[in-house]
Image: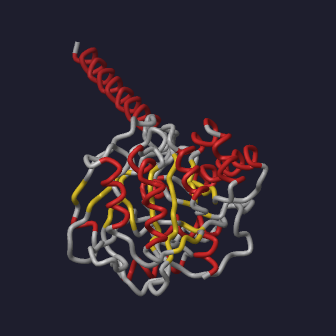
Amino acid sequence: MKKLNNKKVYLALLVFFVLGLSGYAIKALSSEHGLEPPGVNDPQKPLIETTVDDESATQAPGSVTATVDSSEKGAEVKKNGEARPENTGGPSTSPSNAGGLSSTIPSNTGGLSNAKNGWGLKRNDSHLQPEMSSSTIKRLGQHGAYWIGKSDEKVIYLTFDEGYENGYTPVILDSLKANDVKAAFFVTGHYLKTQPDLVRRMVEEGHIVGNHTDTHPSLPDISDEEIKKELQVVEESYESVSGKKGMKYLRPPKGEYSERTLALTRELGYHNIFWSMAFVDWVPMPGGPDEAYRSVMDNLHNGALVLLHAVSKDNTEAMDRILKDIKARGYSFKTLDDLVRN
């Protein structure tokens, strides 16, 4: 009887041992190794448009107004925070492959910081250039990124973000044509697929079409290879629609970037284009077109790089008046090509 009991004990111990090994194996096989970076597999969320006050986002004293960029069914946040008047926005040098993606992924991004930065600048009500931290100015300059023009030139650089069409872009294009103003339109893959005729019109009328990525991810959240794909899909679609090769300008979704993404996209032939003036203009403004007009005119400054959203009815209805009165105040409009050449 004693031997039988011992056998039962040994058998029980053996069962527990086997079950323990099985549980360990199952846990190991189901571990998260190999999953893609955060956000890559997330489903596209409905457009969430909010306003956030986040003083911690700035490196200079003062309040910050965060704005959300309307894009193809994706939420993005941009912050208006800091700047420096003497900044020229970026260098004028260009790599040998500027204007198109290189055939291979640059190999020197592994040691660069991927800490995510939101866009922030500090505005004023004196028609002076916004303030920007010196560290941000230096980082942008090192990687050929721009956010503003020269402080001694009464020049405006007008840009629009296009994630989806709300029916207003044709009227905006009419106003630009009537006032002989050239702008830049940053388009997503969705916009190219759904609005090829409007993109062709932009090109035919002399506007720049920039890359706003295919699916609008925050670039620091995805890998080098995925960033390349995001840009390449848009480039290929743009070539198919317009017959033109090469895109030189990138507006990073959400205004979010890292040293890694700045370096990578520059080596892929792009200048990152941020802004020195932007508003909560993707939703109806309480003051309607008059508020859209005042928002631009009250914040004019030398070298202003203006970001507007073409989904705005208020912007659209105020556009002709805005363009005429900017010129009446002695400003001229130039393109991103002019900005980079300077």
Q: Residue at x 31, y 47 (%)?
A: 288
Q: Quadrant of the C terminus?
A: bottom right
Q: Residue at x 21, y 58 (%)?
A: 53
Is 315 on the left or on the right of 193, as rendered?
A: left
* Residue found at the far top of this picture: 1
Is 243 on the left or on the right of 292, as rendered?
A: right
Figure check: 231 above or below 189? below
The quarter holding residue 19 reads: top left
Task: Say whether residue 34 is visible.
Answer: no
The quarter holding residue 295 reads: bottom left
Q: Quadrant of the N terminus?
A: top left
- The x and y percentages for residue 204 are 72, 53
Is 294 on the left or on the right of 259, as rendered?
A: left
- The x and y percentages for residue 117 are 38, 65
Q: Residue at x 72, y 48 (%)?
A: 236
Taking depth in this image into account, of 80 and 265 the one nearest to the observer is 80
Figure check: 202 above or below 302? above
- The x and y percentages for residue 169 are 54, 45
Taking depth in this image into account, of 59 and 309 the one nearest to the observer is 309
